[in-house]
Every structure is written in structure tokens, then in C-alpha cells.
Amino acid sequence: MLARTDLRGTDVTLSQLRRALPRGGTDINSVLPVVTPVVEAIAEHGASAALDYTEQFDKVRPASVRVPAAVIAQARADLDPAVVAALEEAIRRARKVHADQRRQTSVTQVAPGGTVAEKWIPVRRVGLYVPGGNAVYPSSVVMNVVPAQEAGVGSLVVASPAQADFGGWPHPTILAACALLGVEEVWAVGGAQGVALLAYGGTDTDGAELDPVDLITGPGNIYVTAAKRLVRSVVGIDSEAGPTEIAILADDSADPAMIAADLISQAEHDVLAASVLVTESAALADAVDEAVAERAATTKHSERVLTALGGPQSGIVLVDDLEAGLRVVDAYAAEHLEIQTRDAQAVADRVTSAGAIFVGAYSPVSLGDYCAGSNHVLPTSGSARYSSGLSVQTFLRGVHIIDYDRDALADVADAVVTLANAEDLPAHGEAVTARFGGTA
């Protein structure tokens, strides 16, 4: 049932390879005419406009943008203890991994009396977007909040769509996850209007100020992504995330039932989700195809899964050998890449482009989605070739601190003046010589 791309016996260039691989994606530009007026209205009118659009798009108008503390506390009290325990375990593991990502100030003595330090300063205030849509994503609360907290961000707000089924507040499981993480500020606003309100701020229904943020992170649909594009000159953003994707590099030692389950697990997210198998084994490809057809027909979200697996973004790519397979997965640069081959660790070590790499049969993407300790907010649509997933570094700014004394400046003054003159910027050099009475 999965479309096949047969690259065996071919010698394609990198550009030809990128065009040949299954790829869906979304056209952000196509929704900008819809999203631009929303962003502009909120930039001008703030929270009242955001609530107007929430009422229009989500069919509910919350009593306020900010969710009352009592509502958050009640959501935590009502959450199934098993879910509480699972979330606490996910938080514990995520904290363990992200705590090790914290950077320390480095100081380099460039010359006697001259140092350059690099200090890492947390972003002052961040907005963490948690989507609604086809599923409920408390795991996205964990993945956004933990690295921000470990980076030392002092002020953070979680924004998630208002839900008509829950009195206009975000889903209770989202609120409960916020409570478990100690997040006190949650906004009941999603979509493009949520992103715009995070960027511009406003005044809530009770007159309280909703402060704008400096950075927005977190995934969302095409409208959320378009809004992030529009506000990125006002605030920082993590990325323009596209639909989720999995690629699996496998040889004939792999279990087709496991591969089928993993392909379906990503297709469950969205009809635009991408599931791709790269293999040198035609027999494995056939077995996976059969297993996918059998499993997809009985899974809960069968219609969604079948649509995703049948789309142009999904398929099986046949290659001559493992070397060719590695070239394919590096060109594809998957958000999630599983390696199910002999000596999977050695193969994984050779991959250069992937959002996250899952090694061996017992490291499925689902583990990373929840409890591996890794972060699941990852680059999509091939952007793993040049960008990284969400981490503590996302929330830090590296600032150089230059400290030279008189002798150290004098020692390099001639070089500064020479380079300034070479660039025809003599005042730059004069700014140095002025410190020495006109001569270095």
C-alpha cells in the first residue's frame, strides 16, 4: 500500500535525490492572506481581538485569556493518578538530560591583559505553544517547559487553544501538566491569534497586563506556523515546523512488524504526516507493506493513518546497499530517524542529518515522544540539515565580554589601524589611536 521509489542501479546527484524522495510539506504562503489580518488586528487591539478570533475559530470565548489558578489546580487534582505518575517520570527523565546541556561561562586569554569571555544569558520571557487539534499534548508541555526552566528562563507562559468542551479553558490534561511543572501562567488562546498575542501582549478582561514574550517555541498547524513567520521580526521563534515525519533505515535483519508499527505511529498524528522506509531488502519492503496494511486497518485512527500513508509524503525507498541508504537518509534529513540494521549503533554514528536518531529495535520514536529524556520538538521538512531540535541552548544567548587593558590594546593597535584603513574606515582606527594621544 506504500508507494515505492526504486533507486537501485541509479547514480543520482544530490539535487536529483532530494527531488526523488517522498516529501509532502505545506505551503505557508497559501495561508498568509488569512493569517496576516489576524496578526495585524492583535498587534493593534491586543487581547480583545484575540478573544474575538478565538470565539470565531474555536467556537468559545473564555472569560479571560489567563487561566485562573484555581482552574489549573483543579485540573491537577482531577487527573488520573496513572497519568500523573507517567508525566512525573517523563519530567524526571527530561530534566536529567536537559540539565546536562547547560553551558558555563568560558574565558579565553587572547593576549596578556586581553580576554574574551562568553557568557550564556537566558531569554527573559518565553511563550511556549502547546497545540490542540487531533490529540491532547501534555508531552509538548514537558518538552517546551523543561529546557526553558533548565536554561534559567525567569518568566514563561504556556498558550494552548481554548476548548468549548472545557468551559473555554485549555484541555485539563494540559493544565495539569503545567501544574506538575510549576507553570503558573497559562493562556487560553491558540492558533494564529495565540502566537500574535504572545508576540504583542495586551490587556486581559480584568485589566491585568499580558506581557509580550521575547521568544516563541512549540509546534502547531499551518496557521500557527504562518503566524510565527509573521512575528519573527518582533520576537524570536524556534522554527517553522511542518508535519511530523519518520524515516527508518533498515536491512533484512529488521522485524517488519516493528517497522510497520512505527510507520503507523507517526501517521496517526496527521493526514499530512510522513512515514518513509529506506531499505536494500525488497523482501523486507514486501513484508512491511503487508504488515502495514493489516495493522492500519484495525488501528483506532485508521482513516487518518491510511490517508497519511497513502499520501505523496510517505513510501518505501529501495536502494542498492547500506551506503546508498545512508546517502538517502542524509538527503532526506528526517525529523525522526530510526536505524534498524545490524550493528545499528555504528550505522547511526555515520548519519549526519536527522532531528533525532533512534538506535536499534528497542528505541522507537514513541519512546522519544514521551519518556526517553530527549526532546521531541525537532526540525522537520529537511531542516535537520542545518538546524537542531529544542534544547536548553534554544533559550540561551551567548554574549561575548571583551576586556583589554592599555598594554594589550597597544600591542594590537597597529593591526586594528591597518585593517580599518584597508576597509576605508579610518575613524575605526582613530578610535584606537585616540587612546594613546594620537599614536599607538
Image: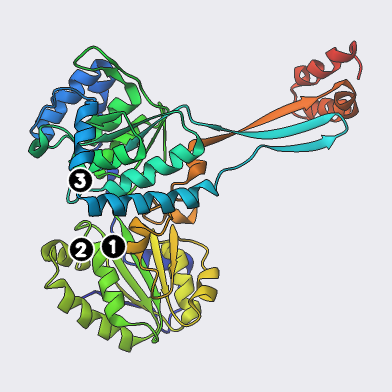
Q: Residue at x 39, y 26 (%)?
A: 213
Q: Nearer the viewer, residue 297 or 172?
A: 172
Do the numbered discs 1 and 2 sit on residues whose CB atoms are within 8 Å? yes
Q: Which marked residue is nearer to the observer: mark 3 or mark 1?
A: 3
Instruction: Pick whichever of labels 2 and 3 is earlier in the sequence.
Output: 3
Residue 308 shows which numbered tag? Answer: 2
Q: Tell me the tag on residue 1.
A: none
Which residue position is annotated with label 1?
Answer: 274
Q: What color scheme is it? A: rainbow
Which amino acid type is marked by label 1? Ala
Q: Where does residue 185 sit, x and y in percent of width and height?
A: 31, 28
**Dot 3, crowdedness within 10 Å: few (<14), some or many (≥20)?**
some
Is label 3 in a helix, a strand or a loop?
loop
**Is residue 121 placed above or below 338 in the rendered structure?**
above
Q: Quadrant of residue 310?
A: bottom left
User: Who is closer to the viewer here, 137 or 331?
Assistant: 137
Quarter placement of the C terminus:
top right
Could you say which disc has been placed on residue 79 in the image?
3
Q: For mark 2, does the 10 Å Cα neighbourhood hold few (<14), some (14 to 19), or many (20 or more) residues?
A: many
